[in-house]
Image (tube, coloured by chain):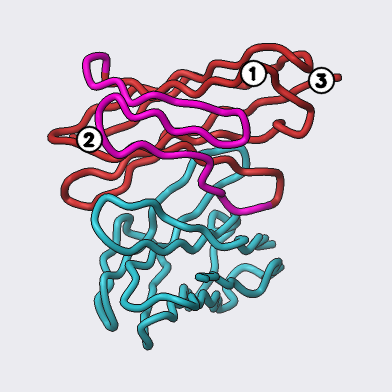
Amino acid sequence: GNSVTQMEGPVTLSEEAFLTINCTYTATGYPSLFWYVQYPGEGLQLLLKATKADDKGSNKGFEATYRKETTSFHLEKGSVQVSDSAVYFCALSDTEDQFYFGTGTSLTVIP
Amino acid sequence: SQTIHQWPATLVQPVGSPLSLECTVEGTSNPNLYWYRQAAGRGLQLLFYSVGIGQISSEVPQNLSASRPQDRQFILSSKKLLLSDSGFYLCAWSVGWRNEQFFGPGTRLTVL
């Protein structure tokens, strides 16, 4: 069946460090891929998305590229800020319109 | 623009009491609607989803139920709450095929 696997957290980085959160997926066909962010006590917000192979989603300095050959959608940011501290979820929507979330990766950025 | 509302924002209930959480969506028609639960420090668990009025699919057997009395209204209920029902409940909507879900602000439920 379809699934999303993302790196275990928590992740702690210093401000201005480079961020990578790994996400790989298993799906038949051509799913859409998403990254969501959840700040403490809030709902999930869509951070970025990609709908086909080689698409790059980007928003607020975050980027992720849809890699079909490696079934990956890793989240990256060149220079994190304290305000980026949150939980990040990778997700996919498959050809049956079913949605699958990863387990979430907690990021803490320290000044 | 589309918005999604959930209420209440927080709720403290005794074990064995009933529950009713409400979710409404504005600015879209015939959305798919979802209820998720998030336990403390954990990922998302899909509880129910609905593709139309009166159409409910359950993902996990439990003492919760869901109803969709109107196109943009989704209700999560329980007749008797358990301690294990504590968590953060999120409602979400989507439209179209392979499109993103949009989440509400959530309800923090504590069962004592």
Image coordinates for residue B94, horizontal then vertical, percent: 37, 61
10 Å neighbourhood of mark 2: few (<14), some, or many (≥20)? some
Q: Mark 1 points at which residue?
A: A11
Q: In this view, does B83 lie to the left or right of A3?
A: right
Protein chain holding label 2: A
Q: Mark 3 points at which residue?
A: A110
**Chain A hue?**
red
Protein chain holding label 3: A
Q: In the rendered structure, which amino acid carries the disc numbered 3?
A: Ile
Q: Is A53 in the magenta?
A: yes
Q: How many numbered circles does the render carry?
A: 3
Is label 2 in a helix, a strand or a loop?
A: loop
Image coordinates for residue B88, horizontal then vertical, percent: 59, 55
Q: In the rendered structure, which amino acid carries the disc numbered 1?
A: Val
Q: How far apart are marks 2 and 1 (CA)?
A: 26 Å
10 Å neighbourhood of mark 1: few (<14), some, or many (≥20)? some
Is label 3 in a helix, a strand or a loop?
A: strand
| B90 in relation to B17, above or below | above
**Chain B hue?**
cyan
Which of the two residues, B54 or B96, is positioned nearer the viewer here? B96
Quadrant in the rendering for residue A11: top right
Q: In the rendered structure, which amino acid carries the disc numbered 2?
A: Asn
Image coordinates for residue B63, horizontal then vertical, percent: 41, 66
Protein chain holding label 1: A
Q: Name the residue under label 2.
A: A2
Q: Give the range drawn in magenta.
A: A42-70
Q: Which of marks 2 and 3 is nearer the N terminus?
A: 2
Q: Which of marks 1 and 3 is in front?
A: 3
| A28 in relation to B21, above or below | above
Which of the two residues, B13 or A41, is positioned nearer the viewer here? A41
Q: Distance between the residues labelled 1 and 3?
A: 11 Å
